């Protein structure tokens, strides 16, 4: 399977804990995007990378959120001091270039106890 | 604020019927309009996309109609099948911006 891979698929944690998610894009895709999807809503843009450079961050990405894409391959999204409102599905997508279709992974569902 | 407004929130259609989902936008800089299909527990999968230089695009049973002057576009699912039961999202993007703005989604249920 050469699609976008996300791990873990489901993360349950207590409020205040830190969590990290990983995304492996489709091979050779130089663009990588993170979105957040809450129940009954469409995905909302968080941030995106061109290779290892983080080019844009949404206002939704508070200081507790940080994303990296070292070496321009996989990416990690870390949430520090999690809050109830962080409960959501975190989706990763990749595209070959910026104007090419974005292909999504199956997401990481975060549940905050 | 949501840049793409989608309706209806849900719809039920009989097998063999036509499902129609509508989207409207305000940002005239949008120039790429994809539709995604999402099943429970899965990520969105690209279904079909259109650019504003054409008024209609058809792929199999799925057709996008685009009305640039009205700033509206719609997805038609012809001969709906139970396997089409899913949530459908319209989206839009500015060419040099790359991030997608999604509608709120439409849950389609196809009754056998």
Image: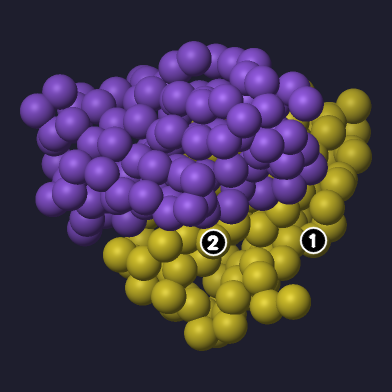
Chain colours: A yellow, B purple
Give percent across and percent down for residue B8. 49, 15
Q: Name the residue under label 1.
A: A7
Determine whether, in the image, residue B48 is placed left or right of residue B85. left
Determine whether, in the image, residue A106 is placed left or right of residue B93. right
Do we see residue B106 in this rendering? yes
Label 2: which secondary element? strand
Q: Comparing marks 1 and 2, which lies closer to the viewer?
A: 2
Give percent across and percent down for residue B19. 52, 26
Q: Quadrant of residue A30?
A: bottom left
A44 versus A39 height, above or below: below
Give percent across and percent down for residue A88. 70, 34
Residue at horizontal 32 percent and vertical 45 percent from the top: B33
Label 1: which secondary element? strand
Q: Quadrant of residue A15?
A: top right
Residue at horizontal 35 percent and vertical 26 percent from the top: B23
Give percent across and percent down for residue B61. 50, 46
Q: What is the chain letter for disc 2?
A: A
Q: Please tell me how crowded label 2 is: few (under 14), some (14-19), or many (20+) other residues with Cα within 10 Å.
A: many
Determine whether, in the image, residue B34 is placed left or right of residue A107. left
Q: Mark 2 points at which residue?
A: A103
């Amino acid at each position: 399977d050469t699609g976008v891979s996300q791990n873990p698929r489901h993360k349950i944690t207590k409020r205040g804990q830190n969590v990290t998610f990983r995304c492996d894009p489709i091979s050779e895709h130089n663009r990588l995007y993170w979105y957040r999807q809450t129940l009954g809503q469409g995905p909302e843009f968080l941030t995106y990378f061109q290779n290892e450079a983080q080019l844009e961050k949404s206002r939704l990405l508070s200081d507790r959120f940080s994303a990296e894409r070292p070496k321009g391959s996989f990416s990690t999204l870390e949430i520090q001091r999690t809050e109830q409102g962080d409960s959501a599905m975190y989706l990763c997508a990749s595209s070959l270039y910026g104007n090419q279709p974005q292909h999504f992974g199956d997401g990481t569902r975060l549940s905050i106890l | 604020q949501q840049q793409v407004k989608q309706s209806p929130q849900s719809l039920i259609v009989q097998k063999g019927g036509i499902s129609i989902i509508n989207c409207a936008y305000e940002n005239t800089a949008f120039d790429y309009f994809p539709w995604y299909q999402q099943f429970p527990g899965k990520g969105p999968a690209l279904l079909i996309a259109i650019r504003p230089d054409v008024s209609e695009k058809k792929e199999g049973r799925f057709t996008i109609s685009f009305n640039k002057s009205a700033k509206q576009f719609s997805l038609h699912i012809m001969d709906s099948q139970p396997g089409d039961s899913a949530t459908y999202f319209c989206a839009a993007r500015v060419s040099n911006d790359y991030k997608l703005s999604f509608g709120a989604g439409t849950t389609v249920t196809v009754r056998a």
